[in-house]
Image (cartoon, grey):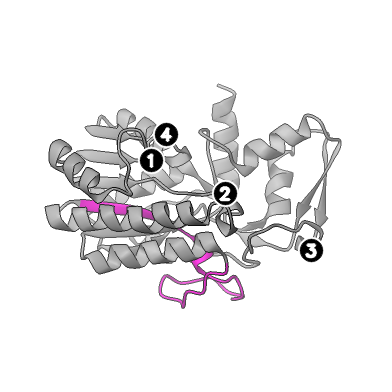
């Protein structure tokens, strides 16, 4: 049981981590941007010296993918690269473990089979480029670090595709959703549990990929979310739903390395149903 420092504590994953660590009776400090600006290395150094965590759980990120293409470009880089570099360097200097969350967007989505951890990176949008630079900063720091790539994240805290679909379903009899982008949905609970698992089993440092098992298009994901409603969900192509930032067409990452640590990964359908049930409790 390590003493943890959560950064990005008010985000979707940060709040899930707090709930999980409370359940596990872990000692932790949860810091949002008002308590720690990770883009200020001196502030990061001071906070780590003060709190003396054994592990930093980095759930801080700029995730506005479309805004990162223009108005948010500078902030995207500042948080996802400079902030990550600061956390990694301070972790290395203080012999503190670090878990950094990255993204499937480090890949270009042109591969037809599952992406392996070491496959070539070719991010096609600004968010993906920044997260890949963040990964490199972690690796180059020499910190005792885990990089965990994930995708299509949903959970109770914050904005995500599940809530978007549910809210649209309240006012629309028919929804159109893209059916030519394939990936793996990820419940924040599964992701948080995997982060804890890596520490508990003292897994080898390095890069892992973690989503829920199975795969789906956004259309198939939406159909499952709204299966108990009367809303019609219709498939469309990405060309019919243009977005500012490029989205990978094939975003399925291999989970084999994560599974080899002994972590049991629920299917995305099971994870989604557990999540939806928890909302009704």
Q: Is residue 211 left or right of residue 181?
A: left
Secondary element under disc 1, as helix, strand or loop, is loop
Circles 1 and 4: CB atoms closer than 8 Å? yes
Q: Residues within 10 Å of mark 3 (few under 14, many from 20)?
A: few
Height in image: 72 above or below 232?
below
What residue appears at the point 50 percent right and 48 percent down from the top-left corner? Answer: 266
What residue appears at the point 41 percent right and 75 percent down from the top-left corner? Answer: 118
Q: Quadrant of residue 85?
A: bottom left
Q: Quadrant of residue 214?
A: bottom right
- Ranked by sequence position, the earlier of labels 3 and 2 is 3
Q: CA distance from mark 3 to mark 1?
A: 34 Å
Height in image: 28 above or below 210?
above
- The x, y position of residue 115, in whole percent, is 51, 71
In the picture, which quadrant includes the N terminus?
Answer: top left
- What's drawn in magenta, residue-wise? 97-124
Label 2 belongs to which residue? 268
């Amino acid at each position: 049981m390590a003493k943890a420092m959560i950064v990005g504590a008010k985000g979707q994953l940060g709040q899930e981590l707090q709930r999980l660590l409370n359940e596990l009776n872990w000692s932790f400090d949860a810091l949002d941007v008002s308590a720690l600006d990770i883009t200020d290395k001196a502030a990061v150094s001071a906070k780590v010296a003060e709190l003396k965590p054994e592990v930093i759980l980095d759930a801080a990120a700029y995730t506005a993918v479309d805004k990162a293409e223009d108005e948010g470009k500078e902030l995207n880089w500042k948080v996802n690269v400079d902030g990550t570099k600061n956390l990694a360097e301070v972790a290395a200097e203080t012999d503190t473990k670090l878990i950094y969350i990255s993204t499937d967007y480090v890949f270009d989505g042109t591969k037809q089979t599952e992406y392996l951890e070491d496959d070539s990176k070719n991010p096609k949008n600004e968010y993906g480029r920044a997260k890949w630079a963040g990964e490199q900063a972690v690796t180059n720091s020499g910190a005792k670090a885990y990089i965990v790539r994930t995708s299509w994240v949903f959970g109770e805290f914050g904005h995500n595709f599940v809530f978007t679909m549910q809210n649209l379903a309240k006012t629309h009899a028919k929804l159109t959703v893209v059916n030519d982008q394939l990936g793996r949905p990820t419940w924040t609970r599964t992701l948080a549990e995997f982060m804890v698992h890596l520490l508990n089993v003292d897994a080898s440092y390095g890069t892992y990929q973690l989503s829920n098992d199975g795969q789906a298009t956004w259309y198939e994901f939406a159909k499952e979310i709204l299966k108990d409603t009367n809303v019609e969900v219709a498939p469309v192509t990405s060309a019919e739903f243009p977005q500012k930032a490029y989205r990978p067409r094939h975003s399925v990452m291999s989970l084999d390395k994560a599974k080899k640590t002994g972590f049991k990964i629920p299917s995305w359908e099971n994870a989604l149903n557990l999540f939806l049930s928890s909302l009704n409790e």
